[in-house]
Image (spheres, grey):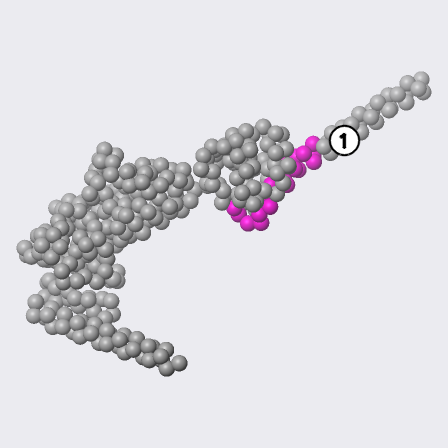
Amino acid sequence: MTNRFFSVTELILGLLVWLAAAFLVAESRWSRLYEKPALAAGDTVELYLPEQTDGKGLVRTLNEEGILRSEEEFNWALQTLHWSTFKEGRYQLQEGISYEEILSKLGNGIQDPMRVTILAGQPKSRFIRKVSEAFRFDSTALKQTLSDSSLLARAGVDTQRVIGRLYPATYDFYWTATPEEVIMRILDTFEDQIITEYEERFKELDKSVNEIITMASIIEWEANVESEKDTISGLYWNRLERGMKLQADPTVNYAVGERRRLLYQDYKVEHPYNTYIYAGLPPGPITNPSKSSIRAALFPTDHDYLYMVASPDRNHGFSETYSEHQRKSAEWREWLEEQYRIKREREEGREEGNGSG
């Protein structure tokens, strides 16, 4: 009886020891997989996987980034959790992320969105270069998308005028978004923010979206300060309504292919966008205008100005008559000549100072 009692007791004790050992092993395994940091880096890390990869490829990428804490332990986690394929994407890996978290995140393709800001006043070439730098696709793919007439037709725009509808804003995108997804998202935003919001105003003015956006794009490049946009808009509309040529310097900048101080011969460049040669608005927008420039085109200030010239404070001097404009232009030229004189004297002084040593 006693021997039998001891055998049962020993059996129970043995079972308890086994259970305790199994618990400790399971607890250790749980801790390693779900609590122990997988990465050596102390801060949040951005990881880019340009294509789908397997476990070996993932380990290689993490090692190349120099952020893997232990390759041996990472391989153990891969086998234990049975992950074998990891999806392309951009991932933010937080400090202290566990093996289970990182493998689940990459295995399920749970990307982190990134913020992309579209600036106003960009030439199409700069837009293509800057935007493509943020995504997996390259500039050639984006350029082809902006030349895809059938795709753009779905948004009611053509290849010549699409630049004006690349609405300036900050967007959340996934790094793996296609060029088509990016462009259609931007065009949809333009639809919501401009066409829908100002639908009644377009009807009141009896002007097309292209006319307003083209005018707004010229205002975007002409105005140095926000407070002048409405006045500049009124001046340009005044010229058109009175049958004058628009004679907008930004359209000449567009025609010569760069924004710089214009030379006398630039105004004679034969180009359909040169409003010193051709009457009316140019065929399409010269850049992507900001919302404030679009508002200025839609709500111009009511005045009688027909002329403007730059002034030293980066604003413009506005005139109703040509004689007044000539006087202000002469004042502007005198100021410029004085600045050039001061600059020459400073340069000559520096040269003399360098030579005296």
Q: Residue at x 17, y 68 (%)?
A: 317
Q: Is residue 159 left or right of residue 17?
A: left
39 falls in the magenta region: yes
> Is residue 69 positioned above or below 327 on the image?
above
Q: Is residue 170 left or right of residue 230?
A: right
Q: Position of residue 79 (x, y in %)?
A: 61, 29
Q: Residue furthest bottom?
A: 356
Residue 186 location, quadrant: top left
Q: Residue furthest left?
A: 243
Residue 39 location, quadrant: top right
Q: Residue furthest right?
A: 2
Q: Is residue 10 left or right of residue 87?
A: right
Residue 154 visible in this rendered orientation of the protein: no
Q: Nearer the viewer, residue 349 or 263?
A: 349
Q: Position of residue 170 (x, y in %)?
A: 36, 48
> Is residue 54 positioned above or below 278 on the image?
above
Residue 241 location, quadrant: bottom left
Element type at marker 1?
A: helix
Q: Position of residue 235 (x, y in %)?
A: 14, 60
Give the residues drawn in magenta, as a range: 26-45
Q: Quadrant of the C terminus?
A: bottom left
Residue 117 visible in this rendered orientation of the protein: yes
Q: Amino acid at mark 1?
A: Ala
Q: Residue at x 23, y 50 (%)?
A: 287
User: Label 1: few (<14), some or many (≥20) within 10 Å?
Assistant: few
Residue picked out by circle 1: 21
